[in-house]
Amino acid sequence: MKIGLIGLGRMGGNIARRLMRDGHQTVVYDNNADARAALAKDGGEAVESLEGLVKALPSPKVVWVMLPAGEITENTIQTLSGLLGKDDIIIDGGNTFYKDDARRAEELAAKGQHYVDVGTSGGVWGLDRGYCMMIGGDKPTVDYLDPIFKTLAPGAGDIPRTEGREGRDPRVENGYMHAGPAGAGHFVKMIHNGIEYGMMQSFAEGFDILKNRNGTQLPERERYSLDMADIAEVWRRGSVVSSWLLDLTASALAKGPELDNYSGFVNDSGEGRWTVNAAIEEAVPAEVLTSALFARFRSRQDHTYAERLLSAMRMGFGGHIEGRGTPPKEGEHS
Amino acid sequence: MKIGLIGLGRMGGNIARRLMRDGHQTVVYDNNADARAALAKDGGEAVESLEGLVKALPSPKVVWVMLPAGEITENTIQTLSGLLGKDDIIIDGGNTFYKDDARRAEELAAKGQHYVDVGTSGGVWGLDRGYCMMIGGDKPTVDYLDPIFKTLAPGAGDIPRTEGREGRDPRVENGYMHAGPAGAGHFVKMIHNGIEYGMMQSFAEGFDILKNRNGTQLPERERYSLDMADIAEVWRRGSVVSSWLLDLTASALAKGPELDNYSGFVNDSGEGRWTVNAAIEEAVPAEVLTSALFARFRSRQDHTYAERLLSAMRMGFGGHIEGRGTPPKEGEHS
Amino acid sequence: MKIGLIGLGRMGGNIARRLMRDGHQTVVYDNNADARAALAKDGGEAVESLEGLVKALPSPKVVWVMLPAGEITENTIQTLSGLLGKDDIIIDGGNTFYKDDARRAEELAAKGQHYVDVGTSGGVWGLDRGYCMMIGGDKPTVDYLDPIFKTLAPGAGDIPRTEGREGRDPRVENGYMHAGPAGAGHFVKMIHNGIEYGMMQSFAEGFDILKNRNGTQLPERERYSLDMADIAEVWRRGSVVSSWLLDLTASALAKGPELDNYSGFVNDSGEGRWTVNAAIEEAVPAEVLTSALFARFRSRQDHTYAERLLSAMRMGFGGHIEGRGTPPKEGEHS
Amino acid sequence: MKIGLIGLGRMGGNIARRLMRDGHQTVVYDNNADARAALAKDGGEAVESLEGLVKALPSPKVVWVMLPAGEITENTIQTLSGLLGKDDIIIDGGNTFYKDDARRAEELAAKGQHYVDVGTSGGVWGLDRGYCMMIGGDKPTVDYLDPIFKTLAPGAGDIPRTEGREGRDPRVENGYMHAGPAGAGHFVKMIHNGIEYGMMQSFAEGFDILKNRNGTQLPERERYSLDMADIAEVWRRGSVVSSWLLDLTASALAKGPELDNYSGFVNDSGEGRWTVNAAIEEAVPAEVLTSALFARFRSRQDHTYAERLLSAMRMGFGGHIEGRGTPPKEGEHS
């Protein structure tokens, strides 16, 4: 299939490369000339404008947009939709908010165009391992694009089959699924990231407790100086918590168990936030996913206003003056 | 009544003073000579040793220990018990762990001595307002000590009566209660402090959200520069959140709404921790009380090991380099 | 002042009554004829339509809308705005989402009309105690409405003054504040309710731990049968957690400490949810306010899908079959 | 090596079998005769008492105790220690509390005996996959037992090696580690389980939000009927959340995506609780691990006392009557 690709960053560039490796043709655009040149070198047909990209594609034209979610993606898709005709297809492969997908699909449908949202997981590893994809859109369009998805997906590989899946959609075992109408792909990807936050925080807290087990405030015979790297490694081998995130943890800890080259200033993207918002809309309790998000918020601050207010109240009822050099007096009112 | 008092700090000294104001006699001891002298000036019979204190009291001897919970209190009570005789009474008015009370009461009972634990709330305000007291111990002993408790308690004052309390224990309306056997007083006081943590954190988070409502990342018409001091004040007047903690908050904010003279480094005493442990023993979910405790733990650190591990994992799967100067790229995988 | 009132339910009716008691005139409308008749009996000028209400008011016309937030309020305000002229004023006293306020104020301003949002706290007690009000809108309009707010507010009463407020806005001490532009009133009220959730949950968890202290799984000497009603009562008297919510708790517990006439099926209104969403928008950690919301979500379900999935996983790795009759085997893998 | 095994349940029996498969000899005891007979059939030397077991072993005698943690294990180890002599070794392979290990090791050391604690993960799958083991004890003893551990461990298998581990302890890559002195093995295993709780709860919440995405309270175009089984399956293939727990989830969902044969009544073993207690001792915030524990507590109750108290307070300030048939009125005070 010949497909247009807009946005040739880390993710978009590798998607184009993986498509070409498997025999697809790509027309590629990025507003950065170096990114265009890099892809051209790898076999892409680089163009210098959206107009040029649209012109270079056969009908029905298929364009994969792989840009940062938000304004850039929105504007690009609006412009693109103006350049495209009936039956053409826009794929948003970024991390778009699912409500924007649902709205856009309606807007494009009014012009006879098709909108497909693809949530992709796999990060920097996708070029070689393939991308796990969750897809939203109308069935005929998603079916039409199957050759693209098949190429990008990791395939069944040597991952053991799950019993009881006989008769179920075989695409899923190859690493991609048609989740539902427009927005459903990004919705499922969003929850994936929400879960990812929770799992990461689970490991983070657990290792924090392990690390602090040699504190001098503890009874001497209950103090241990544990080897973080070995613990992560041993858990990879037959334990219940074995997972890709644990593999990454083991790898980071093997390189330096103090992690002192990491800032601990932890960013979050929209998906963790939207996950909590979705839980609230549905009245589903989601303590763990929310706490994992809040831990990241807290990591990006020094002292919060909240904490200063706690100090102020403690001064109010107990006359406590607090500071780094003031250990809590045992038994003191707090 | 003539009563011995050990520990003449902020709390113990004022308890002695409030007792003397109401006609009780006190024999006072502290290992700090200045503290002893201060109380002597206010009418206490200062002694220079535990032996001296015991000697100065009539039988049955009553001694109120008001020391930091933990080793000091434990040792003092053990020594004291050795000096006292049958039928004598030790009161622990500190913030002792209720399991220690239960154990000590058994130990003293074996010698025919009585142990009473008193959880007191009221902080630096107690001298004038009176102390709210939760008492554990055997009934005859608690009844015998009633004149002491009556004096220390705030009394009914002008706090409106609760309907439906006719026929119930009248001591409670005067601000003290016999909660149950030894340990029950400190147990109830411990839960009081656990709730206090939760309420404080509720205010802290709410004001933090109010304070940050002028962030430039928000849509302009949804940004407000709110007056923290006025908000706290207005809520004191007829709102559902009116409370003594809100009074203290209003007072602190009136003095300086930025709270920049407070460190935000928030200590915790044992009670918040024991509350969570008690919840776990009982299999009672206690999300809010626990979160309030953890917020204090977090306030006392820069970056946690947990947060550095999150950064390390993010580097592992997404190649993210994080730092204070690196705002999250929207749409970037996280 | 002569003012129109739309919505004569529990809140709206009493607001009309409190205004009339202080000499204001009211033109009242509700689509329920009985509600209209009840107010007419108490001195209101009852009308049978919005048109009738608008006609009965002098210019500039002032209309207070007191309806359930959401569609009804939105539609009523849109209709009303069509009937009103330049310089007229609409007050939304309901629990409207602050972003709707900000939008409406812009829409009305385009017609030269004024929009004021009033968050009110005080519940069924407001008629007698007065309403604590947080007001959003432009300064001239809020100032113009001052006689209305002054009447509705509780006034300074006998609540002790906060030190350090000299020179500050005196309205605040009377129980109402001009918080900022349109939306600011409801924003502050929303956070008030968020805090209220957190405080309520703090008490709820604390009393749950107290109540379960007689569990047979606990060591015998650490088991207590505590009197819930007395504990709530004693804390009202000098303790750090004294508050109006504690007064209500003491009152409910005095009537029946088992609380078995209450369902435990706990509703939530929009404000708790919006508070969490606002925290997320601002990247402010709000663990406690969020947990309090989720506890309500959970209270309205039997078993969640989440919990069944936990059971399924446990069956997967450990062969555990779970059920009400299956106590956890100590030491069993979980 | 010839080794004694006490406790032939699911775990203990399979440990014996795995040892025998690899050429070790076992002397086996269980107070259930059928369990003894089953092992005897598989090659174990079944004995009818602890005395018999001790007698059947060569010196230094090595006994692996695999019983439910708590009283049974404690009593068995005390009895056993009385029967054993200097230089003999007791291994506790159950889920013992690490503080009990530390104490026991001191008690045994006083008699010249050695105590080794082994935390094992692997559940019902261990017989074939091998057991991931975390070991505490003195170095010479742990080294002496190496043949046993080597047999029980899964071995390196085809799990990719972690870069940067050159020169590190090679046992770890075979799935077992010497974590530290007595107690360290169970401590690391305890934290493993704490993390497991957090990961399980992460998946549980995520799938709950996915499942409830077809709620009628949601805008129609944002409602999706998602296929739980396919989502779990697709994530196994290249996504960031791929893990053994996800494999189990996919398996359970393939068999029945409604999970209606699971109770949702979720037990917890001691480790989740001890993990939180350890975090508190160390003042390490552990929101996620704690929330995961509390979710299990809540799952085992109908309505909590806490929830009834919330209903009671809501009745107090707002006159709300709540019940299953009473949906929250929008805009109503709460």
Image: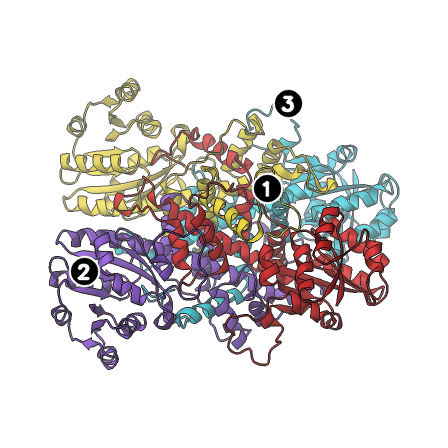
Chain colours: A yellow, B red, C purple, D cyan
Numbered badge on residue C89? 2
Residue D58: image x %, image y %? 86, 40
Give the residue number, with chain letter if any, for mark 1: A239
Q: Is residue A81 left or right of residue B129?
A: left
Residue appearing at x 70%, y 62% in the figure: B117
Residue that badge 3 annotates = D167
Dot 3: chain letter: D
Q: Are marks 3 and 1 in contact (CB under 8 Å)?
A: no
Q: Residue at x 24, y 52 (%)?
A: C139
**Where is A24 relative to A200, above or below?**
above
SS assignment at label 3: loop
A107 to B25, vertically: above or below: above
Q: Amino acid at mark 1?
A: Ser
The amino acid on which the numbered mark 2 sits, given as a three-letter code, is: Ile
B329 up-or-down from A109: above or below: above
User: What chain does mark 1 sit on?
Assistant: A
C226 or D36, nearer to the observer: C226
D259, C106: nearer the viewer: C106
Say whether residue C72 is left or right of residue A219.
left
Disc 3/disc 1 C-alpha distance (Å): 23 Å
Q: Is residue A271 left or right of residue A291?
A: left
Give me the chain letter of mark 2.
C
